[in-house]
Amino acid sequence: MHAAVVGAGISGIAASAVLVSKGWSVTLLEQEKGPNQRLSFAPGLLQGRAVALLRSLAPEPGVPFEASFSSRLQNRRFLKNLRYFANKANKNNSITESFFKFSCNILKSMLDRFGVEDERIDGLWVLLGEAEERRLSEPPEGVDVLSRLEALEREPALSEEVPFSAALFMPDAGSSNGTFLSRQLLEQLLAAEGGRFSFRPGSRVAEILQKSGRVAGVRLEKGGELPCDALVLANARGAAELLKPLGLELPAAGLTGVTFTAEVQNAECLPASSIALPSSPFVLCRTDSRIRACGRFFLGAQTEKEKKAECNRLYDSVLGSLLNIRLVPESIRFWSGEVDALPDGLPAAGTTRALEGLALSVAHADGGLSGAWGAAAICGAALSGGSAGSPAAEALQKACSPDRFAN
Ligand SMILES: Cc1cc2nc3c(=O)[nH]c(=O)nc-3n(C[C@H](O)[C@H](O)[C@H](O)COP(=O)(O)OP(=O)(O)OC[C@H]3O[C@@H](n4cnc5c(N)ncnc54)[C@H](O)[C@@H]3O)c2cc1C
């Protein structure tokens, strides 16, 4: 059986790895010249449960974002669906947590299978202001609550000036370079599974071909067709135009976020774990000798001026809060991207009633580097016709169904 996967970001690479491991032969199609050129170029690092924990501290379910009057007007369908989840925050948080946990396990099994090293940095600090402390009714499982003093003693990057009243520490939340990992995995797939896996960069998919109500292949923009028995759309915002002729329109909205990475001059003050300061707000992770900071997400596209303003704010709040860190000015690199988010913050993952043999792994919002693996496993199970593996995995399959907003 042959599957085509559209999009060589982390979602498409993860979907390819899962399908190959289930015995499919796979062609991965990408419009750019190489992998990870769009959203998965994000120097994003936060993994799994860390994303779920941070979301659970926000006042609303789903991904926290800022919105202007005009962006609200332009995203009415998304906001209408968001209101539906307003009183379901607890349920939504627990599904989100299970989804990211599940995704972490799949990532681990794929890395083991393909012999890829995850240079993961363990642990996440969440520094709480009084508002977040009030909002947190009880700490999630596996999370320690520490006083301000204990946190300052344990984390070398924190200075006495950092404004927080208590801290959460999640030892098993990790950060690693998702983009780097997926690129390595792609190389392994090509080397080890070359007979059953091929990667075709420079191939933009223009149309889904169907026959008797099921997927028959794809038409490429440059000309030519690729027949297939199953198709996974893992092409982020590009999926909407391919889905339109099928009548499937997700209530997604674009959220724009910015990050910066920088070398640290005083390596002894590199954070030992990731640090989130929801009141500022920012999340700081580290790779070997660099840090990466991620700021707020904004509803809709942002002008260059607005993105620059957020970059400046992010830079000032990181340096203003973690005074122990000194950055190498010429090493600072800003980056921004617009992710698609669904109102409940979960991706659209799995098969759809719109067309037999078609699966989606899109709308990963701020958590795609972590959630791509769970979404890939859901697609793999649904297309292979087997069970999802356990009642919990079946519940996730339902929670992430691309058809869940249909009524
Ligand atoms: C500022 C910021 C910080 C983030 N931080 C984190 C983090 O800490 N942790 C985390 O888990 N996530 C994070 N994310 C989210 C993460 O970056 C995304 O969710 C993830 O990269 C999405 O991957 P993807 O493969 O779905 O999309 P992409 O990487 O965009 O891949 C889609 C691919 O499809 C291709 N494509 C599109 N249309 C077509 C077509 N018709 N034919 C062929 N190819 C096509 C595109 O060229 C692209 O390569 C962050 C995002 C931002 C913006």
Image: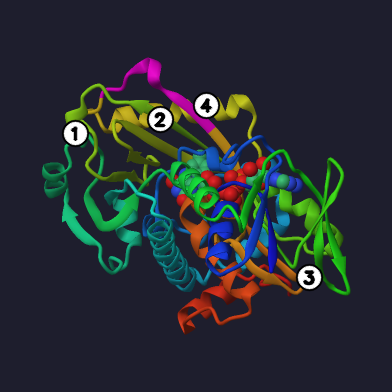
Q: CA distance from mark 4 to mark 1?
A: 25 Å
Q: Which mark is residue 261?
A: 2
Say what amino acid the circle numbered 3 marks.
Ala
Mark 4 secondary-structure assignment: helix
**Quarter-of-image position of residue 232:** bottom right
Say what amino acid the circle numbered 2 marks.
Thr
| Nearer-the-camera pick, 391 or 250 | 391
From the image, state whether disc 4 or disc 2 is nearer to you. 2
Q: Which residue is mark 4?
A: 309
Q: Which residue is mark 1?
A: 159
Q: Earlier in the sequence, mark 3 or mark 2?
A: 2
Query: Against 5, is 300 above or below?
Result: above
The part of the chain drawn in magenta is 326-335
Q: Earlier in the sequence, mark 4 or mark 2?
A: 2
| Nearer-the-camera pick, 112 or 163 | 112
From the image, state whether disc 2 or disc 1 is nearer to you. 2
Q: CA distance from mark 3 to mark 2?
A: 41 Å
Q: Residue at x 26, y 57 (%)?
A: 170
Mark 4 surroundings within 10 Å by alpha-carbon count, few (fewer than 14), some (14 through 19), many (20 or more): few
Horizontally, is 77 left or right of 101 in the view? Answer: right
Does the magenta-highlighted stretch encompass residue 334? yes
Q: Which residue is mark 3?
A: 354
Q: Earlier in the sequence, mark 4 or mark 1?
A: 1
